[in-house]
Amino acid sequence: MVPLSWYMLLSLAVFTIGVFGFLTRRNIILMFMSIELMLNAVNINLIAISHYMQDLRGQILALFIIAVAAAEAAIGLAIVIALFRNKATAHVDEVQELKG
């Protein structure tokens, strides 16, 4: 059986890759992919701890997080497509209309 610490290390690695990708990339689509990596790292933690404690609440919460992530991806990609049709760019630095 795989120890719980290995799952935690895997989750830490995936979350770190997601944070690094979000902070260094300027492309909106790559930023969304980095957010999805961070959400999947949280899901790995929830499911591993849930399995370790013999409780289903963490796995149910992970399903809700997957549903929210799918809705976030759909809405985010719709915004990116609308932005690309108007400005022909997907870089965060070139978008000025969203600033207050």
Image (tube, rainbow, N blue to C red):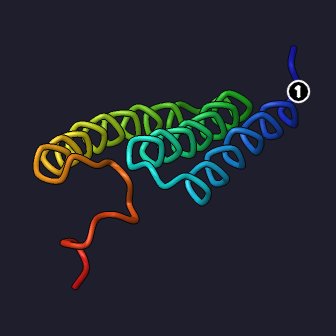
Q: Is residue 52 above or below residue 92?
A: above
In what element is the residue under mark 1?
Answer: loop
Instruction: Tell how many labels.
Output: 1
Q: Is residue 76 left or right of residue 33?
A: left
| Residue at mark 1 | 3
Residue under the image location 53 percent in, 44 percent down: 34
Which residue appears farthest toward the top when viewing the image? 1
Q: Position of residue 56 (x, y in %)?
A: 52, 31
Give the camera-side residue of 78 and 81. Answer: 81
**On-image quarter of the C terminus:** bottom left
Question: Few, some or many C-alpha atoms within 10 Å of disc 1 (few <14, some 14-19, many ≥20)?
Answer: few
Residue under the image location 25 percent in, 40 percent down: 77
Q: Is residue 10 left or right of residue 49?
A: right
Give the camera-side residue of 95 and 22. Answer: 95
Q: Position of residue 91 (x, y in %)?
A: 38, 54
| Amino acid type at image mark 1 | Pro
Residue under the image location 55 percent in, 54 percent down: 22
Q: Is residue 69 left or right of residue 16?
A: left
Give the camera-side residue of 12 and 82. Answer: 82
Q: Position of residue 55 (x, y in %)?
A: 59, 33
Which residue appears farthest toward the bottom when viewing the image? 100
Q: Position of residue 13 (x, y in %)?
A: 77, 41
Q: Is residue 1 above or below residue 79?
A: above
Q: Is residue 37 left or right of residue 48?
A: left
